[in-house]
Image (cartoon, grey):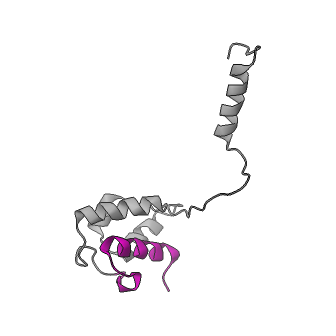
Amino acid sequence: MHSHLVQKIVQIFAEVLGTKPEQIDVDANFFAMGGDSIMGVQIITKASQMGIEIAPELLFENPSVSHIAKAIEAKGCDVYIEQKRLEGKVPLTPVQKNILCFNQLKSSENNFGV
């Protein structure tokens, strides 16, 4: 059983290579599987959209799913973040609160030099 990160990277490789995820060997070289530099850029872009940061040199120096996943996990930080759609009421972020407050102050008669 592979980690969630490995499964996501396999999914990305499969999409870019035009194959099924179960046909991706996690230890196989991306370029030996038919990948090229343009597809490599597509992998980096798709990964970024999924919250997985893959540096170009990582893909080109360690072009297998297992090596990429190990390198990301070795960083020891939260590189992988699964994004989910928010629905309904959600609290404002601190930046949004500041913008709202600033706009209210700016529009009032007594803006106190703001």
Instruction: Between residue 102 and residue 73, name the one nearer to us.
Output: 102
Q: Is residue 80 left or right of residue 11?
A: right
Instruction: Between residue 30 and residue 99, name the one nearer to us.
Output: 99
Q: Is residue 2 left or right of residue 107?
A: left
Q: Is residue 88 left or right of residue 80?
A: right
Instruction: Between residue 12 and residue 27, name the one nearer to us.
Output: 12
Q: Is residue 34 left or right of residue 76?
A: left
The span shown in magenta is 1-27
Q: Position of residue 19 (x, y in %)?
A: 34, 79
Residue 109 within the segment the image draws in magenta: no
* Residue 67 seen in the figure: no
Q: Position of residue 15 (x, y in %)?
A: 37, 72
Quarter of the image where one finds residue 99: top right
Q: Position of residue 105 (x, y in %)?
A: 72, 22
Q: Who's the residue at 40% across and 68% down the image? A: 71
Instruction: State whether residue 78 is above or below residue 100.
Output: below
Instruction: State whether residue 63 is above or below residue 109.
Output: below
Q: Who's the residue at 50% across and 86% down the image? A: 1
Instruction: State whether residue 46 is above or below residue 19.
Output: above
* Residue 71 seen in the figure: yes
